[in-house]
Image (cartoon, rainbow, N blue to C red):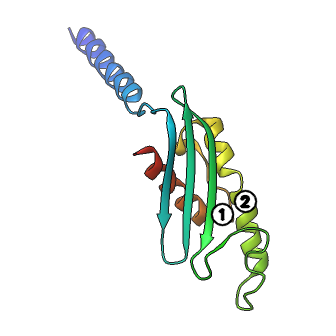
Amino acid sequence: MKRKKFKFFVILILSTMFVTACSSKKELKDGVFEGYYKDESATVKVVITIKDKKIVDCVREERDNKNNKIKDENYGKDDADFNYKQAQKAVKNSEGYAKKLVEVQDIDKVDSVSGATISYKRFKSAVKDALNK
């Protein structure tokens, strides 16, 4: 009798896990979607293209709110109080986030990169904003 109950509970738990895992991923709608994240120091915009219910393109743009300039190879050059090398490390390390999203198809499977953790959190929020539209 105990063995039958044990099997029943194991099957019940595994079934619940399977149903939860299968239903947790939201089905994507085809189209082009913009998402944003803004805090006191930066604004991130993403443009995500979905075709055949898959992410086929993602473009990421991060702007410095202090001077409204895109964070690129010149980011931090003009600011004497800013650590240019650290700023450039963050810019370089965050460049792969959009490409990785297209590759793995799930923002929760995109890993943050050392030196660009804040950019990752901003990117993730902007992606979620876009995909919720």
* Label located before the other in sequence (2 or 1): 2
Corner quadrant of residue 116: bottom right
Say whether marks 2 and 1 touch (CB < 8 Å). yes
- Residue at the image point whose x is 70% and y is 91% from the top: 81
Corner quadrant of residue 102: top right
Residue 35 pos. (x, y %)? 49, 54
Give the Cα separation between the discs numbered 2 and 1: 6 Å
Residue 67 pos. (x, y %)? 62, 81
Q: Secondary structure at mark 1?
A: loop
Going by the numbered disc 1, the residue's amino acid type is Ala
Q: Residues within 10 Å of mark 1 (few under 14, many from 20)?
A: many
Q: Residues within 10 Å of mark 2 (few under 14, many from 20)?
A: some
Quadrant that contains the C terminus = top left
Going by the numbered disc 2, the residue's amino acid type is Asn
In front of the other: 90 or 58: 58
Tag of residue 116: 1
- Residue at the image point whose x is 62% and y is 65% from the top: 62
- Residue at the image point whose x is 51% and y is 28% from the top: 53
> Above or below — where is 105 with respect to 130?
above
In front of the other: 35 or 111: 35
Corner quadrant of residue 12: top left
Quadrant that contains the N terminus = top left
Circle 2 is placed at which residue position?
A: 93
Tell which residue pokes out farthest to the left in this image. 1
Q: How many marks?
A: 2
> Above or below — where is 78 with respect to 5?
below
Q: Secondary structure at mark 2?
A: helix
Query: In the image, is 52 to the left or to the right of 100?
Result: left
> Above or below — where is 20 with respect to 33?
above
